[in-house]
Image (tube, rainbow, N blue to C red):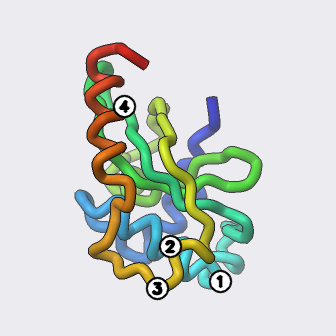
Amino acid sequence: MSAYDFERSFEIAKIGCPNGYCFPNAVRALRNRQRFVKHTVDLRGAKYIEGCVEIDQGIIIQHGWIELENGTILDPTLAAIDCGKIERRYFPLARYSRQELIGKRLNAFPIAMVELAQQQTALSRGEI
């Protein structure tokens, strides 16, 4: 399982990551990656991820986050509402590079909407 890095996620959250907008929050952070180099957050080679996250035992939601090349999870949306590090289970479905996001408007996310709904249903039923 990949590790969630609260400290670096919180650094990214400082740009303004409103709750309920996880997909555009992650995309915006990845697109503006140069802003974070001076804040110990290096997003070069990072991917935008669409999938599901278990926010509480048995409560699974569709979600978007960033994953570094080494598998570390950066989740600015949840870091913005957490008071500290809370371990969660992440279930990635689709990965996109920064280049693959070029030309896509923020309101176009999530890209894999139908597949996310299917994944969420399967996870909630314990089928995955």
For marks 3 and 4, give the one nearer the viewer: 3
Crowd rating for badge 1 (residues with CA inside 10 Å; few <14, some 14–19, many 20+): some
Q: Which mark is residue 29?
A: 2
Tell me which label, 3 or 1, sits earlier in the chain.
1
Crowd rating for badge 2 (residues with CA inside 10 Å; few <14, some 14–19, many 20+): many
Q: Which mark is residue 103?
A: 3
* Disc 2 to disc 1: CB gap under 8 Å: no
Tell me which label, 3 or 2, sits earlier in the chain.
2
Residue drawn at point x = 54 percent, y = 49 percent:
6
Q: Position of residue 110 (x, y in %)?
A: 34, 60
* Disc 4 to disc 2: CB gap under 8 Å: no
Crowd rating for badge 3 (residues with CA inside 10 Å; few <14, some 14–19, many 20+): few
Q: Quadrant of the C terminus?
A: top left
* Disc 3 to disc 2: CB gap under 8 Å: no
Q: Which residue is mark 1?
A: 34
Residue drawn at point x = 63 percent, y = 38 percent:
3
Q: Secondary structure at mark 2?
A: helix
Tell me which label, 2 or 1, sits earlier in the chain.
2
Q: Position of residue 14 (x, y in %)?
A: 44, 71
Q: Tag 1: residue type?
A: Gln
Q: CA distance from mark 3 to mark 4?
A: 30 Å
Q: CA distance from mark 4 to mark 1?
A: 30 Å
User: Residue 12 vs residue 99: left or right?
Assistant: left
Q: Which residue is mark 4?
A: 54
The residue at the far front in this view is 114
Q: Secondary structure at mark 1?
A: helix
Q: CA distance from mark 2 to mark 1?
A: 9 Å
- Quarter of the image holding residue 123? top left
Q: Position of residue 114 (x, y in %)?
A: 29, 47
Q: Position of residue 103 (x, y in %)?
A: 46, 85
In-front residue for pair 93/22: 93
Q: Tag 3: residue type?
A: Gly
